[in-house]
Image (tube, rainbow, N blue to C red):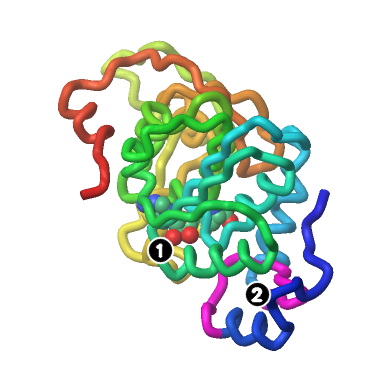
C-alpha cells in the first residue's frame, strides 16, 4: 500500500510545501507531503499512520467501484488512503474550515482526486447520497449529540459498511444485554460491563470538545441501537459494521431532526 509520497511533486517546490504547511498549521494529521511532515511532534506519534496500520487489514485492499464518505476527515489522511485503494469517489467532510484547507492542499500535493466539503455530520441528509463505505473515526466523543449522529448516518449516509472509531474509557468488559430489566433491578447499572457513556462537563485532555466518552459496551450498544451490526473489532477502538434495518422506528420529531440539512 502507498502511504508516503517520496518527494516534492511537479507543481510544488519543497520550499513552497514547507511554507504552506507552516501557514496552514497547526496540523492534527501527520502527513508526508513531498517529504515534509505536517505534524512531526504529534503527541500520539506518527498519527494517524500508527493507528491505520493496526486496522487497515479490515478493509478491502481494492475499493474500485466503491464510494466512500469520510466524516470528520480532518486533513484527509483516511480519505487519501481510501483513494489510494482505488475508490471511485471519496468525499471528506468536516465542520472546521481550517482542516479542510489542509486537506485540499494535501490532495493537491498528493495529486489525489478527493473532494472535501464543509459539512457537519448532522447535515449529511443534505448530500442525498448513500456511500458504500462510511468512515466515522474519532468524531463521536466530540459531539454533544452522539446518538443523533449515528442515527443520521444510518438513515441517510450509510449503504453498507461503517468503520467506526472512538476514544474509549472505563471498563473494557462487555456483558450480555437482556431484552428487559425489571424496575427493581438497580445493581446492573453498577456493573463494569454495562453500557456507560461518560459525560465530560468541562474538559478532558485539554480539549473542550470532548463531550461523551463511551466504555466498550456502550460503543457497541450505541452502534447496534443505531442499526449497525458489528462484524469485527480489528483494533481496540475500531469497529467494522454493516448497516442493517433498525429494530425501532423514529418518532416524527426525531425524523425531523434526522432530516436536517444546511441552510
Ligand atoms: C479527533 S479528529 C479525527 C480526525 C480523523 N477522522 C481521524 O480519525 O484521524 C475529529 C475531527 O472531527 C471533526 N468534527 C468535529 N465535530 C464535527 C461535526 N459535527 N461534523 C463533522 N466533523 C466534525 C473535527 O473538526 C476534527 O477534524
In front of the other: 257 or 212: 257
Q: Main secondary structure of the magenta part?
A: loop
In front of the other: 106 or 260: 106
In the rendered image, residue 28 lying in the magenta stretch gets the answer yes
At a point 38% along the width and 45% down the height, the residue shown is: 121
Which residues make up the magenta segment?
23-41
Asked if the beta carbon under badge 1 is closer than 8 A to the nearest atom of ligand 1, the reply is yes
Give x and y (percent) for residue 160. 55, 24
Mark 1 highlights which residue? Answer: 96
Q: Dot 2: few (<14), some (14–19), or many (≥20) neighbours within 10 Å?
A: many
Query: What label sits on residue 38 in the rendered view?
Result: 2
- Residue 183 in the figure: left or right of residue 175: left
In the rendered image, residue 184 lying in the magenta stretch gets the answer no
The CA distance from mark 1 to mark 2 is 17 Å
**SS of the residue under disc 2:** loop
Query: What label sits on residue 228 in the rendered view?
Result: none
- Residue 186 in the figure: left or right of residue 136: left
Amino acid at each position: 500500500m502507498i502511504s508516503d509520497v517520496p518527494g516534492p511533486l511537479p507543481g510544488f517546490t519543497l520550499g513552497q510545501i514547507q511554507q504552506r504547511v507552516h501557514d496552514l498549521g497547526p496540523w492534527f494529521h501527520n502527513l508526508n507531503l513531498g517529504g515534509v511532515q505536517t505534524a512531526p511532534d504529534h503527541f500520539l506519534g506518527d498519527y494517524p499512520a500508527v493507528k491505520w496500520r493496526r486496522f487497515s487489514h479490515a478493509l478491502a485492499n481494492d475499493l474500485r467501484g466503491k464510494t466512500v464518505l469520510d466524516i470528520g476527515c480532518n486533513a484527509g489522511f483516511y480519505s487519501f488512503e481510501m483513494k489510494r485503494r482505488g475508490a471511485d469517489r471519496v468525499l471528506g467532510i468536516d465542520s472546521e474550515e481550517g482542516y479542510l484547507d489542509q486537506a485540499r492542499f494535501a490532495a493537491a500535493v498528493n495529486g489525489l482526486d478527493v473532494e472535501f466539503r464543509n459539512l457537519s455530520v448532522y447535515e449529511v441528509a443534505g448530500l442525498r447520497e448513500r456511500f458504500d463505505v462510511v468512515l466515522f473515526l474519532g468524531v463521536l466523543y466530540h459531539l454533544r449529540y452522539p446518538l443523533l449522529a449515528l442515527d443520521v448516518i444510518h438513515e441517510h449516509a450509510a449503504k453498507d459498511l461503517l468503520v467506526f472509531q472512538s476514544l474509549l474509557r472505563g471498563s473494557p468488559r462487555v456483558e450480555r444485554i437482556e431484552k428487559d430489566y425489571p424496575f427493581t433491578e438497580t445493581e446492573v447499572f453498577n456493573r463494569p460491563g454495562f453500557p456507560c457513556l461518560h459525560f465530560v462537563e468541562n474538559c478532558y485532555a485539554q480539549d473542550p470538545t470532548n463531550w461523551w466518552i463511551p466504555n466498550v459496551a456502550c460503543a457497541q450498544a450505541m452502534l447496534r441501537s443505531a442499526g449497525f451490526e458489528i462484524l469485527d473489532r480489528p483494533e481496540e477502538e475500531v469497529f467494522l459494521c454493516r448497516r442493517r434495518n433498525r429494530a425501532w422506528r423514529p418518532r416524527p420529531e426525531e425524523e425531523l431532526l434526522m432530516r436536517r440539512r444546511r441552510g
